[in-house]
């Protein structure tokens, strides 16, 4: 079953899919980040949310591979 990721930021939604949650996170394409955001991960009926109240945290998720791995693992644990 595939993972689906939705990022709500700047009053827009960006969606991506992947075999793993990390692949889905890495395939997100976001134009610019100017506000806080909400990251929603889904796998079937399971769902996890993570709010990023600070812009630099959200930018780090989109650009830093190490931070992406940490977020992906934490969200996978939240789904179980």
Image (cartoon, rainbow, N blue to C red):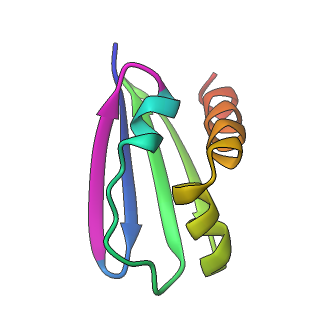
Residue at 38%, 66% (x, y): give it: 8
Badge count: 0
Horizontal side, residue 80 vs residue 23: left or right: right
Horizontal side, residue 59 vs residue 74: left or right: left
In the displayed structure, 22 sits above or below 37; it is above
In the displayed structure, 69 sits above or below 32; it is above
User: Which range is magenta?
Assistant: 12-20
Residue furthest to the top in view is 1
Q: Name the image quarter holding the C terminus.
A: top right
Give the x, y percent position of residue 62. 52, 58
Q: Is residue 72 magenta?
A: no
Give the x, y percent position of residue 43. 41, 25
Residue at 68%, 31% (x, y): give it: 73
Overall secondary structure of the magenta section:
strand
Residue at 57%, 68% (x, y): give it: 59
Residue at 49%, 56% (x, y): give it: 39
Q: Is residue 13 magenta?
A: yes
């Amino acid at each position: 079953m595939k993972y689906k990721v939705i990022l709500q930021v700047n009053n827009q939604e960006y969606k991506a899919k992947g075999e793993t949650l990390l692949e889905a996170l890495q395939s997100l394409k976001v134009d610019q980040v100017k506000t806080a955001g909400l990251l929603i991960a889904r796998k079937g009926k399971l769902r996890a949310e993570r709010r990023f109240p600070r812009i630099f945290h959200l930018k780090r998720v989109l650009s830093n591979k190490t931070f992406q791995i940490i977020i992906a693992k934490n969200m996978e644990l939240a789904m179980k």
